[in-house]
């Protein structure tokens, strides 16, 4: 591929990657809703969707890495040393759109990270509530005593 073609493919890849990040935000929303509803069927579906989303995101990331490696070879620099910012700088005027997409991707990733941290806090809260309820119900003085008593299982399974 020539330089312009590779840059065009990289732009398309970044657009797809930005969409995947937006899909991640929607997935976190779905996960929060499933946790709030305490619906195991919804939760299982959301987990499956998350797994599929991870696979699709990995494919896009691999394609981006391959395109950056092609650009690195063109510019005769190590692929590991070339970042999207470096591509934008080296591409000059042809990399203007890449710079905009790079900034949008960074913003999208930051949003996903923030939402995932919030989800992790919600999950941690649920775990602590469940542990406290079990401790009270079993009349234990510590969580260690609860853990020694066994494990909870899904009675529907």
Image: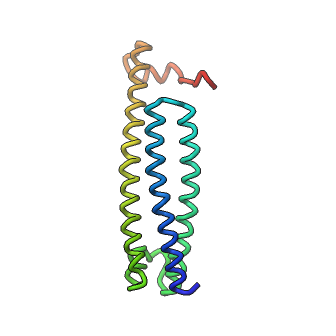
Quarter occupied by the N terminus: bottom right
Which picture quadrant has residue 93?
Answer: bottom left
Question: Where is residue 76 shown, x and y percent of the image?
Answer: 49, 87
Residue at the image position 40 percent from the left and 70 percent from the top:
102
Asked whether 110 or 27 is in front, the reply is 27
Residue found at the far right of this picture = 157
Q: Nearer the viewer, residue 42 or 149?
A: 42
Residue 61 rendering spot, x and y as whole percentages: 52, 65
Q: Quadrant of residue 105?
A: bottom left
Which quarter of the image is occupied by the C terminus?
top right
Total marks shown come to 0
Q: Choose top left, top right, bottom left or bottom right for residue 126.
A: top left
Up/down of 43 relative to 7, above or below: above
Q: How is the image coloured?
A: rainbow
122 to the left or right of 10: left
Foreground residue, 6 or 142?
6
State the residue at coordinates (48%, 60%).
19
**Looking at the picture, does residue 53 appear above or below residue 133?**
below
Question: Residue 36: horizontal and vertical position, in percent?
Answer: 43, 32
Residue 20 pos. (x, y %): 49, 58
In the rendered image of this protein, does residue 85 appear above or below residue 51?
below
Q: Which residue is depicted at the point 53% across and 21% down?
A: 150
Residue positioned 40% across, 20% down in the render = 133
């Amino acid at each position: 591929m020539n330089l312009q073609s590779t840059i065009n493919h990289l732009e398309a890849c970044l657009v797809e990657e930005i969409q995947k990040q937006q899909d991640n935000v929607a997935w976190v929303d779905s996960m929060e809703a499933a946790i709030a509803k305490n619906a195991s069927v919804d939760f299982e579906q959301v987990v499956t969707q998350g797994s599929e989303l991870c696979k699709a995101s990995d494919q896009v990331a691999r394609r981006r890495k391959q395109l950056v490696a092609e650009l690195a070879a063109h510019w005769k620099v190590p692929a590991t040393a070339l970042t999207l910012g470096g591509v934008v700088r080296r591409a000059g005027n042809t990399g203007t759109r890449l710079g905009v997409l790079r900034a949008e991707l960074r913003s999208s990733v930051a949003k996903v990270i923030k939402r995932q941290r919030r989800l992790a806090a919600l999950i941690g809260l649920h775990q602590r509530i469940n542990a406290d309820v079990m401790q009270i119900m079993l009349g234990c003085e510590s969580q260690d005593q609860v853990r020694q008593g066994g494990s909870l299982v899904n009675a529907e399974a």
